[in-house]
């Protein structure tokens, strides 16, 4: 079959297989060759691609729930969306959730995903009590922060390169309502949005849409969205995908003029200040999930998301420079997001570190990769790094400078013979 990540680039021919039980998986791994496990394929690039791919989607049962402490034990192919269906009506929600719910629990751990509350709560792995991991020889190891802690730290954020995550014990957070109290504030420029992020750093959720093509005095103009869980009310949940992009749009549709026009209207039509209106959890956390196949908007060549984080001290200067370069190139898209990260954890390859992160989409274009290499230099000059879950073209040099614990990760891979069994196109490109 043909397979691709969310960015629809690259598209490769793969041999696919599934497993429903541990025995099935063990016998698959005993066949010589290397594999990568594939969850919902919501990573943008090539981290879940290899010539042989094992899908986790049939390994997706809930095994246990402790209603006093909100601790669920489930199989790693379970999606966040399925967890929400079951637990939101009972008053429980994910402690950390990314901007789509169509991801698996295994994928969330492997990318150690972050949400709009990283500055307060940290990454997904902070709420993972334990997991079982199948190693390259079929052995199953129970990993917690205390036992097999090296494997725990390497697997959270380890992009499927340490083994296959099987069952997971996950702590949910209690909620009283399926609504979020949201405040929207529009900001004229980068300085204003930075000041507002800092001013509201005690608010649980914060994220900003940023106009990546604005220039001059408008550079960095954005809309800050703040949110808190509503503390009483109903706990009902219903979700429908309202729209669908039926086919790949002609790639010419998204260009600097259409994106600038969209950004202009989006910024100017959003009221300057909306205080604490109620929005459904799905609308607050997963606005894009409403549009099925929205990745077709970028055309048949596909797209990539470039997500960087810069150290807190140099975030302002670095982002200013990066936004100037993007504005001058005219290559950015309307999906550009700015977030404040809190302290980094001690996993070897987790992406977040204290500072600001910018994520933005670029459609694949002949000039794109040389432009992104210029951005890479600015990112490294500002003590930054790129997110592996979004990446499709990073060079090894950029990876090793951005992730100083890469040696520990590579040593472990070598020592436990993981390199023989678990590889992705990304790990081969990065030489991990
Ligand atoms: C619209 C959208 C919004 C997003 N927003 C955010 C965000 O806000 N924050 C954020 O951090 N990320 C975000 N992401 C990225 C996404 O959360 C991650 O890429 C996540 O890992 C995808 O999970 P998946 O199940 O689709 O995994 P896949 O994309 O299939 O795989 C991702 C990686 O996980 C590994 N993996 C999957 N299952 C297992 C397993 N059982 N055992 C071991 N390894 C495994 C794969 O090998 C691969 O390396 C977003 C993506 C989209 C499309």
Image (cartoon, helix red, strand yellow):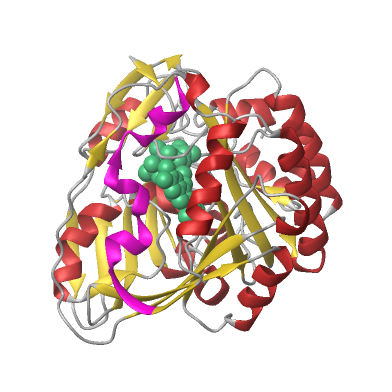
Residue 95 place in picture, x, y as percent: 38, 70
Instruction: Please say if 136 is above or below 280.
Output: above
Q: Please give left or right for residue 70 compared with residue 54 in the image.
A: left
Q: Is residue 286 magenta?
A: yes
Q: Residue at x 56, y 25 (%)?
A: 425
- The quadrant of the picture showing ligand 1 is top left
Q: How many marks?
A: 0
The quadrant of the picture occupied by the N terminus is top left
Q: Nearer the viewer, residue 3 or 336?
A: 336
- Between 121 and 160, the residue placed more toward the observer is 121
Give the side of residue 129 with respect to residue 377, left or right: left
Q: Is residue 57 magenta?
A: no
Quadrant of the rendered structure where residue 306 is? top right
Q: Could you say which is closer to the camera, residue 215 or residue 352?
A: 215
Q: Nearer the viewer, residue 312 or 218?
A: 218
Q: Where, by quadrant of the figure, is residue 84 drawn?
A: bottom left
Give the left or right position of residue 362, taking residue 99 as reference.
Answer: right
Look at the picture and state if 412 lies above or below 271: above
The magenta segment: 276-299
Q: Locate residue 101, reporting x and y percent.
A: 32, 52
């Amino acid at each position: 079959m043909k397979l691709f990540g969310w960015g629809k680039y690259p598209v490769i021919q793969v041999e696919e297989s599934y497993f429903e039980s541990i025995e099935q998986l063990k016998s698959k791994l005993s066949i010589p060759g290397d594999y990568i496990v594939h969850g919902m394929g919501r990573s943008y690039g090539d981290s879940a691609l290899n010539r042989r791919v094992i899908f986790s989607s049939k390994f997706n049962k809930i095994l246990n729930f402790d209603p006093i402490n909100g601790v669920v034990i489930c199989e790693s192919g379970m999606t966040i969306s399925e967890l929400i269906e079951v637990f939101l009506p009972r008053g429980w929600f994910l402690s950390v959730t990314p901007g789509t719910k169509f991801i698996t629990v295994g994928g969330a751990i492997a990318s150690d995903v972050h949400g709009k509350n990283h500055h307060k709560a940290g990454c997904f792995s902070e709420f993972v009590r334990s997991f079982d991991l199948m190693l390259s020889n079929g052995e199953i190891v129970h990993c917690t922060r205390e036992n097999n802690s090296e494997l725990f730290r390497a697997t959270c954020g380890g992009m499927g390169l340490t083994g296959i995550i099987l069952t997971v014990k996950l702590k949910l957070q209690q909620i009283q309502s399926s609504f979020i109290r949201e405040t929207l504030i529009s900001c004229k420029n980068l300085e204003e949005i930075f000041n507002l992020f800092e001013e509201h750093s005690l608010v649980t959720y914060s994220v900003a849409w940023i106009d990546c093509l604005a220039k001059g005095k408008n550079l960095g103009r954005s809309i800050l969205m703040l949110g808190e869980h509503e503390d009483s009310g109903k706990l009902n949940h219903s979700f429908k995908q309202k729209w669908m992009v039926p086919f790949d749009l002609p790639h010419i549709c998204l260009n600097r003029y259409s994106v600038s026009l969209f950004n202009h209207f989006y910024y100017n039509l959003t009221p300057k200040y909306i205080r604490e209106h109620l929005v459904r959890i799905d609308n607050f956390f997963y606005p894009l999930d409403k549009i099925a196949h929205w990745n077709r908007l970028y055309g048949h060549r596909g797209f990539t998301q470039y997500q960087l984080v810069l150290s807190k001290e140099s975030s302002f200067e670095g982002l200013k420079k990066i936004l100037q370069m993007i504005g001058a190139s005219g290559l950015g898209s309307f999906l550009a997001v700015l977030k404040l990260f809190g302290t980094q954890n001690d996993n070897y390859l987790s992406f977040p570190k204290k500072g600001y992160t910018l994520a933005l989409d670029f459609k694949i274009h002949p000039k794109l990769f040389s432009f992104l290499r210029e951005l890479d230099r600015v990112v490294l000059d500002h003590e930054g790094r790129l997110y592996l879950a979004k990446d499709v073209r990073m060079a090894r040099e950029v990876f090793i400078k951005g992730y100083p614990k890469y040696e520990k990760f590579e040593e472990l891979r070598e020592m436990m013979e993981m390199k023989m069994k678990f590889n992705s196109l990304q790990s081969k490109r990065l030489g991990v």
